[in-house]
Image (cartoon, rainbow, N blue to C red):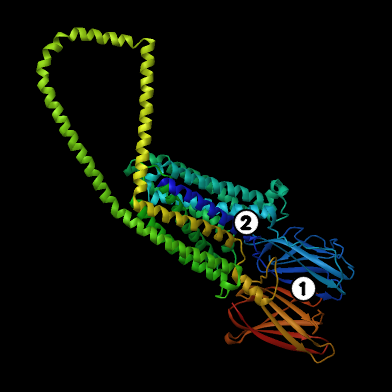
Amino acid sequence: MTQTIAPRVRTLVLLLLAAACALLAGAGPASAHAALTGSDPREGAVVDKAPAQVSLTFSESVSMDDDSLRVLDPKGKRVDDGKPSGTGGTTYSVKLHAGLPDGTYTVTYQVVSADSHPVSGAYTFSVGAPSETSVTVSGQGADGGFVGGLYGVGRYVSYAGFAVLVGGAAFVLACWPRGSGVRVVQRFVVSGWLSLTAATLLLLLLRGSYTGSGKVADVFDLGLLGEVLQTKAGAALVSRLLLLAAAALFIAVLFGAYDKREDEERRDLTFGLAVGGSVVAVGLAATWAMSEHASVGLQAGLAMPVDVVHLIAVATWLGGLTALLVALYRGPADTPVPALAVSRFSRVAFGSVIALVVTGTYQSWRQLGSWTAFTDTRYGQLLLVKIGLVAVLVGVAYFSRRWTAQLAEATPAVARAAAARRAEKGEKGEKGTGKASTKASRNASAKTGAKAGTKASGNAKVAEKESGTAKGPGTAKGTGGSQRAAQLARQRAAVDAARQKRQRDADPNRFGLRRSVLAEAGIAVVLLVVTTVLTQTEPGRTEEEAKAAGTSSAGSSAPATGAVTLDMPFDTGSQNGKGVVRVELDPARVGVNDLHLYVERPDGTAFDIPEVKVALTQKAKAIGPLPVAPDHITTGHWSASGVQIPMAGDWEVAVTVRTSDIDQVTISKNTQIG
């Protein structure tokens, strides 16, 4: 039966690896997690005269270097001073050379968002009138190419290694303490530690090139590595390596001192290992939570601990499941996984699933924001696939629980039958021993005289034989006999092991459990791939708001989370007194906000006016009007940072526009803030 199972196992493993590679290959470059929500000049705009600077506004904090923001003329030459200046981490600007001629200019940017993902993109604007341009902007993202693909593989291996390390150790401590002495289980947990360590080192080396040039040669640039160590993502990777050193000590104790202790001493050591292992596992999970999705956006203070619980629940379930599979298929025949250990893991897995459902529901709400995002965004579609896989996995786990229950019921009966067989053999042996003893006693008296008469000659012969053993041929014969005995002992041990394995595999309950656990592990591999791709995909909430706002970002639409845009037509009654005022309030929440105001003619061209004022009022609470005095940035653009909104609710945004010394008008719109 084992021979028929092995080809199936190999075939299924190959299919799972193929599915994993297909999903990773189809994932493409990671979508940008910070979005370009505004620019001045705007994309496609035609301005009368060259602006003094170009400014970009992102949906969340980003980091830049001197080459992150470039402005190129129609011939592809840089016309900026190469020193971007930031405002609050979300708005950056770069000054342009004076006296720029008319034509189409290209703005390119490449930054790193607060959740550690690279963001890149480009757009054009024109001075005077559009013209031909020789600048070609590659569609390749900052995180694409060979380095980007290798970085994605490193992320997957790190998640898999974390699951194997944490889940395998938890399986031994909580479910099968005697498994600490099983060599295949030891190798399994150690392989998780090695995979996570190697993947972390790889990610640390690739990080600089991944967020920058994308060149393989930059992977070994020590200067670039030094810059990475000063970033949030770099600090998280270094912290992970330090925690892995503590994990190595934990593994040494688990498979060393713990395995050699007696049952009572082992119970005392279990508590200490459980506490120490939990601290290390939480720390490792926090290196992801504090540097990726959970660290930015809504309720980051709550999202990070929720993400830690989610990661540990995934590792405990999937890693423990794989450890059980390895023990069932590759464990020694004389140390089978007991039914009690499988029952314990079933309870642990059930608790992990409950934790996954609770934390996953919160994460889904936080990242999607609406039901339509499930079907209208790539993140939502991947999340639906993940939910479906979890549902299938839980269904297969139900069958595993049934096999576990049947195995637990059958085990006492099998043990009793084996004990009965041993007792029966023991009784037969005692009867045979008794008969031999009686026969020997009858013959003893008859042989006593003969033995006494021949004692001297017998002693002489014995002495002669003993002296003969010192000779060469006798020694060779004795050595050959011992080698033959050892060889026969090994053959008998191999035959006994094969017999025990056949008996183990012949158990229908254990065979059914192995098949169901194998199916669970196969689904878990694909689930882990989808989870890895999700961590590299732009949240659905951001993508949905991007579509509503009509803005664009690197690779896909992505607006600021919660940003409000108000378009208000005005007419002061004078010549050239008509136009549109666009007010952008970001992030439109209680606290500090950024305000951008654009003035355009009815045909969409930007123009300046003598004065513009803004006031915010919440009539329901009798708050305001709160005056805002924006600064003039460039043609048709005013901006104000640090705008304080003290309370959530329905706010009136009033804008006073003056187009001449005597012509002005106040227009207003209401919007929900907070």
Disc 2 target residue: 232
Q: Which comes before the other along the chain, label 1 or label 2? A: 1
Circle 1 SS class: loop
Seen from the viewer's position, the closer of residues 655 and 516 is 516
The amino acid sitting under disc 2 is Lys
Find out whether the residues at labels 1 and 2 contact each other: C-beta distance under 8 Å: no
Q: Position of residue 302 (x, y in %)?
A: 52, 65
Q: Residue at x 39, y 23 (%)?
A: 483
Q: Position of residue 69 (x, y in %)?
A: 76, 62
Seen from the viewer's position, the closer of residues 278 and 666 is 278
Q: Is residue 586 visible?
A: no
Circle 2 SS class: helix
Note whether 205 is above or below 593 in the view shown. above
Q: Residue at x 70, y 65 (%)?
A: 554
Seen from the viewer's position, the closer of residues 259 and 317 is 317
Mark 1 burial class by Cα count in 10 Å: few <14, some 14-19, many 20+: some
Disc 1 target residue: 42
Q: Is residue 554 visible?
A: yes
Q: Position of residue 543 (x, y in %)?
A: 63, 71
Q: Residue at x 38, y 12 (%)?
A: 473
Position of the C terminus by quadrant: bottom right
Cα–Cα span, label 1 and label 2: 31 Å
The amino acid sitting under disc 1 is Arg
Left or right, residue 598 beside residue 403 = right
